[in-house]
């Protein structure tokens, strides 16, 4: 990897062994978990207005640790900024993240606004430096 072609984004390892990062959706900053196993970037349904997300019903059912078959909404054509990396046509899945945030709170971690999924990692040709706690996204 030629670092000149990548934008470094600091990651923060939580007490729950999740990497968190800051990102802006539609110009609004939020806290997100980096999840290589999540197929899509997600935002808590309770944060839709906060991030200016216009959504519609979805056929997609969300599943995750401790939860499955959750109803979702979809919001198209959103912008995201992670560090200096930007994408203007992001599709976001909205669903109830209460089970995620409850688990974080139990372990004295702060709740998050959403999850950065593999859609971003693939689009950004991401490299995760676990040792130095950085995410690199291709310019």
Image (spheres, grey):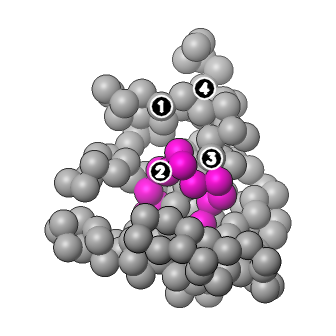
Q: Which residue is mark 3?
A: 118
Question: Can residue 39 be found in the magenta stretch?
Answer: yes
120 vs 139, nearest the viewer: 120
Label 3 Cα crowd, 10 Å radius (few <14 / some 14-19 / many 20+): some
**Mark earlier in primary sequence (2, 4):** 4
User: Disc 2 to disc 1, how far (Cα)?
Assistant: 10 Å
112 vs 79, left or right, is left
User: Disc 4 to disc 1, how far (Cα)?
Assistant: 11 Å
Q: Are discs 2 and 4 less than 8 Å apart at CB?
A: no
Q: Which residue is mark 4?
A: 6
- Mark 4 or 3: in front is 3
The residue sitting at 57% across, 61% down in the picture is 24
The residue stretch that appears in magenta: 30-42
Which secondary structure lies at badge 2?
A: strand
Relative image position of residue 56 (x, y in whole percent): 80, 85
Q: Which residue is mark 2?
A: 34
Q: Quadrant of residue 127?
A: top right
- Mark 4 or 1: in front is 1
- In the rendered view of the protein, which quadrant contains the N terminus? top right
Relative image position of residue 11 (x, y in whole percent): 38, 43
User: Disc 3 to disc 1, how far (Cα)?
Assistant: 12 Å
The residue sitting at 54% across, 74% down in the picture is 68
Relative image position of residue 44 (x, y in whole percent): 53, 77
**Mark earlier in primary sequence (3, 2):** 2
**Mark earlier in primary sequence (4, 3):** 4
- Mark 2 or 4: in front is 2
Compared with 3, 56 (above or below) is below
Q: Which residue is mark 1?
A: 128
**Mark earlier in primary sequence (2, 1):** 2
Compared with 31, 136 (above or below) is above
Q: Are discs 2 and 1 less than 8 Å apart at CB?
A: yes
The residue sitting at 49% across, 51% down in the picture is 35
């Amino acid at each position: 990897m030629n670092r000149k072609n990548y934008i470094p984004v600091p990651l923060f390892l939580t007490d729950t062994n999740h990497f968190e990062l800051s990102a802006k959706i539609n110009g609004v900053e939020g806290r997100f978990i980096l999840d290589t196993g999540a197929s899509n970037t997600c935002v808590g349904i309770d944060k839709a207005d906060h991030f200016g997300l216009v959504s519609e019903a979805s056929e997609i059912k969300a599943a995750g640790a401790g939860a499955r078959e959750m109803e979702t909404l979809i919001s198209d054509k959103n912008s995201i900024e992670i560090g200096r990396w930007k994408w203007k046509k992001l599709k976001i899945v909205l669903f109830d993240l209460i089970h995620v945030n409850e688990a974080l709170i139990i372990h004295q971690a702060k709740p998050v606004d959403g999850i950065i999924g593999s859609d971003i990692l693939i689009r950004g040709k991401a490299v995760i430096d676990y040792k130095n706690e950085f995410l690199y996204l291709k310019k």
